[in-house]
Amino acid sequence: MFGPETRGLPASILDALPAEQKIRIPMVPDSRSMNLSNAVSVVVYEAWRQLGYPGAVLRD
């Protein structure tokens, strides 16, 4: 679940989720928010990397 670019998810939703189900993308202080599609790309890529890139090589 991803929230709006400028403010993220509402506190009521964040409070309902256990800590192990939350991901925070670190950013430089005072930087603008990350574009939502870029944030999704970062999270999906990192999950794929941690799984060892299954299916990354096409086999004939």
Image (cartoon, rainbow, N blue to C red):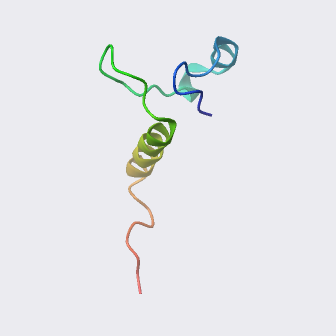
Tell which of 33 and 13 is nearer to you. 33
* Quadrant in which residue 59 is drawn: bottom left
Q: Is residue 60 above or below residue 12?
A: below
For the view shown, which residue lies furthest in the left direction? 28
Residue 55 percent location from the top left of the image: 45, 67
Q: In screen coordinates, is 30 left or right of 7?
A: left
Q: Is residue 50 above or below residue 33?
A: below
Q: In screen coordinates, is 7 left or right of 47?
A: right
Tell which of 39 and 16 is nearer to you. 39
Residue at 49% x, 42% y is: 37
Residue at 33% x, 20% y is: 31
* Quadrant in which residue 25 is drawn: top left
Residue at 41% x, 41% y is: 42
For the view shown, which residue lies furthest in the bottom direction? 60
Residue 1 percent location from the top left of the image: 62, 34
Residue at 56% x, 22% y is: 8
Q: Please identify the quadrant where the C terminus is shown.
A: bottom left
Count of marks overlaid on the render = 0
* Quadrant in which residue 47 is drawn: top left
Residue 52 percent location from the top left of the image: 38, 55
Tell which of 12 and 54 is nearer to you. 12
Residue 22 percent location from the top left of the image: 54, 26
